[in-house]
Image: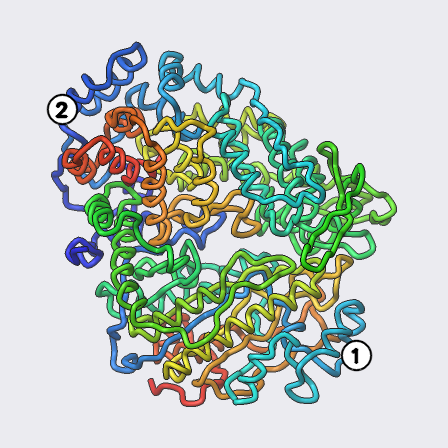
Amino acid sequence: MGAVSLASAEDQIATPPISRSRGITRRQALAAAVATGVGVGVVRLLGGSMQQIGAPHRATTTDWISPLGGESARVMQLLRRTTFGYTQPQLEAALSDGYSKTVDRLLETKPAEPPALAAATTPGGRFAINLAQQWWIDHMLATPTPFAERMTLFLHGHFTSDYRKVADDSFIYWQNLTWRRMALTNLRSILISVTTDPAMLRYLDLATSTGQSPNENYSRELMELFTMGAGNFTEVDVRESAKALAGWQLPQPDTYATVVVDKANNVTRRLPVYSSQKAGVFNARRAYKGSVTYLGKTGQLDTQGVIDQILAQPATAALIAGKVAQHFVTARPATTYVNGLADTFRRSKYDMKTLMRAVLTSPEFTADQSYRSLVKSPTEFMVHTARALGVSPMSNISKLIAGAGSGMGQSLFDPPDVNGWPNNESWISSNTVVERVNFVTGALAQTKGKLPPSSDVIHKQLDGVLSPQTAGLLNQAADERGRWFIALASPEFQLK
Amino acid sequence: MNKELGINQLKRRDFLKAGLVFGAGASGLAAGYAAVPDAFARAVYAAKKEGLANDNILVMIQLAGGNDGLRTLVPLADPALHDLRPKLAGPMVSQALPLNNQYGLNHNLGGIKGLWDKGKVAIVQGVGYPNPTFSHFESIRIWETGDPTRRQVDGWLGRTLATSYDSNGHPLTGCACGATDAPGALRDLQATLTVIQNQKTFGFTGGTEVEAAVGALYKGTPGIYGALFDTAIATATETMATLRTSASSYQPMADYSDKVKLVYSSKNQLAAALQLAAELIVTGTGVKLLHVTLGGFDTHYTELNRHDDLMGYMDSAVSAFYQDLAAHNMASKVLIATWSEFGRRPKENASGGTDHGAAAPLLLIGDPVQGGLYGAEPSLTTLDSTGNMKYAVDFRSVYQEILSGHLGADAGKILGANFDQVPFLKAPVAV
């Protein structure tokens, strides 16, 4: 019922019932079940899928048939939306734990730190950005705590920074480490981390803002994009908080190195070297000395004071909750749903774990209407593909993924603008769909050896819920490689 | 690909249904203007009415981030500029390419200055709208939809596609070149358009076999994204077929180069995007409304070199584009227009840059143009309460002239009202 029920009642138009069979036939499902082999998890999985597939599928709308009445399908949807895909053992573990214990595990397991990026100590952070991109993708593929990576990607889009303007890839790397560590803490400390993050200090110009001549860039986006949203503050607030926030500077380097930056002309530059990650530093001499009137409060405000004023606005919790709901639950979350999440978030003193638990355990998350209501971002789609194929993390796949993202509209550390990435329908254009299909071709070409059985992807990734076209083409495919291509290039696999 | 599998077969009911689904929640979203997908529908060169049966073409160049108007068209003799911009004003005035004794072009706009000398550049000064917003995204949306009240969801070019051209399976009528997703200006529920990031890589790896399989796979896809996916694939395969033909019959007659060194590199390949636009135009693919973007104009810091670099990049790409069109005898048909969400604050900040501003000049370039200065430069001494220049010309007045004078479209219907035209066209189309 997904499509129609997302529109408000009066907007619904009468569509003549179309009698069309959905999914693959019971006989095909049984054949696939036999081919899959039997383990405890698999039996549970097929139990869930079989109920789904076994029922007569005569749809009266042109919608996917939701299998979310079954626990196994709910668990698989949970994993699709909170991880970067799953391997067979991970799926079996989650199915054996069940939905609610899996939510606990996602939220309560301490995020695994990625291995250090060797290039990060390069003077001036002058190393190729694809090293950082591949480093992160490798971690997405290998990590035992993929939820932390999904949250890091979400925050990278929300509190975004662009390596081009930051012009120091070490800062970008540090920001990634910070975002991962702060993801499930509380918004108050998150906003301090964001404000004093060296990459952010560069990206939104706070590092060059002074009390005497404030730069409004960070002040504006902190309110408009990061917390309250447009329409909830005035231009006066922008100017006043620009004054109050002024004074932050980049951290002092440990040392400098003289580096040849232009070999042909023998040009050298002294570039900063940091032996370890550092945050921005506050220089009181650059700060604003007077009093400001900000969001209704007058007095001397420091950065903490600005953030506390922002947290006192109801719009802040609503914006964060709405964005989380849109990212993890449904493209068009209902206002009442978002308001409920925002209330929970505020009452918890802005605890992100509480918010995420409320989201993942809400009936909306597993409602039939939520089934395939989100489009995988390019990074999710590509890493899901690699994991479904069982590609080894250290192979060339991360290089392929890092390079292929831009054609699909998502190159890591390189968002289109300060609003981060768009989502859902914005991922679909004539250019991006072609690039997605081409990525499948490229990824399959990297799997030289034996592929996992294609019935795996149909049941464990796609819940056995297929369009007649996809089912038909799977039947016609000449071999396993062809079936894998159809499954991964299908519209079903683009959704979550 | 079999035409019958294509978007020609998308049923009107599917559009309506999808339209309702996507339209319903639009206002509730942070990025409301992103709610309209690019794909539903299709458009076409076959005009819906007599007046549109001309073969004029529009190319919009978005200067994303807020282009500094004062550094594009430089006031040469206003002492207030030096007070407001003690660091930035000196070099920009002394190096400017004078157009008269009052104004000069940025010194890196030499190619465009050459076109100005031939009467092919119109500059409309002081373009803006009432109660300006200083949010990039709100202001972009206002320019894209042509609606400062922010109620309109469809783009002004998308509405032009939908209202003025037949929907008969010509997805190249509206095309975004050098982008991965559809610009808001071209979006409309009833308009299909094409997005091509890079022509050289636009195709299926594996060729026609893959193309056929994918065409069959994306057909009658269920769910709220079904029509979008299906139309995107159908549009892509039709466009690939068109490009196969056009690429073989097009020879660039100018030097397009994206090998520019920028202080803060823009992620767009403007020259390649304009070269693709030229190919689509000169090979008669039926393109009508084209959109390209150059980013990097949000110059809050060290603006001096960054903005000069961007001006130089734009100048070389636009000059090559014009030269190419002229060599193919197509220059008389093509109007090139720049737009940007806002200008920049007249007063510079401590970072050697400028914050978000308001009114700014627009450039209109090409043979259809009656060269010269239009509008009025806002005063640098009587700024508004935010320290910004007050606008003299509503941006919809520029749209009005483009729509009715160049395309022959019903501007009043598209914009919701008729606006005073800025008469920058040599021979406006009779509507």
A151 relative to B349, above or below = above
Q: Amino acid at mark 2?
A: Arg
Q: Is residue B172 left or right of residue B151?
A: left
Q: Residue at x 47, y 29 (%)?
A: A394
Dot 1 alpha-carbon crowd within 10 angstroms: few under 14, some 14 to 19, many 20 or more? few
Mark 1 secondary-structure assignment: helix
Q: Residue at x 30, y 60 (%)?
A: B192
Give the image location of residue A34, x and y in percent: 18, 17
Q: Quadrant of residue B238?
A: bottom left
Q: Nearer the viewer, residue B40 or A170?
A: A170
Q: Quadrant of residue A70?
A: top left
Give the image location of residue B342, x and y in percent: 59, 65
Q: Quadrant of residue B39?
A: bottom left
Q: Is residue A189 left or right of residue A379?
A: right
Q: Which residue is mark 1?
A: B79
Q: Nearer the viewer, residue A362 or B255?
A: B255
Q: Amino acid at mark 1?
A: Pro
Residue A26 bears which disc, if any?
2
Q: Residue at x 60, y 70 (%)?
A: B311
B412 relative to B5, above or below = below
Quarter of the image containing the N terminus of chain B? bottom left
Q: Chain of mark 1?
A: B
Mark 2 secondary-structure assignment: helix
Marks 2 and 1, how far apart at CA: 82 Å
Dot 2 alpha-carbon crowd within 10 angstroms: few under 14, some 14 to 19, many 20 or more? some
Quarter of the image containing the C terminus of chain B? bottom left
Give the image location of residue B139, x and y in percent: 54, 61
